[in-house]
Amino acid sequence: MKEFVLVISMWGNNGTVWEYIGNQYVMNEKFTEAQCEILVDNSNWKKHIINEFYKLQFDCFHEDNHN
């Protein structure tokens, strides 16, 4: 079974494009791809966005490809 990890990364908008700002969190728990995709689904999160120039991005990566 392929294992996937949930990665939360931080992004900033420079006024034109979104750029990765170099910080990420990788959940220690492993998931199937389907389980991980449920976690990243926007409908599962309540967002409170005050600064429109920064965002968190939720992604699923195969365990061997998250670095």
Image (spheres, rainbow, N blue to C red):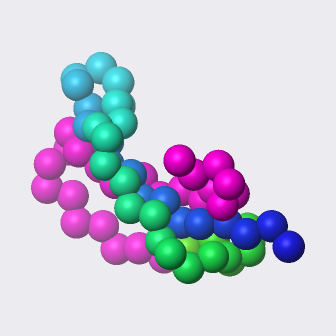
Q: Which residues are magenta?
A: 40-67
In the figure, 33 relative to 66: above or below? below
Residue 18 location, x and y as percent? 35, 31
Residue at screen point 20% across, 39% down: 53
- Give how far across and how far down residue 31 sits, in percent: 67, 76
At x 41%, y 73%, the residue is: 45
Q: Quadrant of residue 25?
A: bottom left
Q: Toward the viewer: 59 or 16?
A: 59
What x and y, as percent, mark residue 16?
30, 20
Q: Is 41 a magenta residue? A: yes
Residue at 26% across, 32% down:
13
28 shown above or below 61: below
Please provide percent x and percent y for residue 20: 36, 36
Residue at the right extreme, as displayed? 1
Q: Is residue 50 above or below residue 17?
A: below
Would you say 13 lies left or right of 57 here?
Answer: left
- Please determine whether, in this image, residue 19 is positioned above or below residue 23: above
Residue 38 visible in the displayed image = no
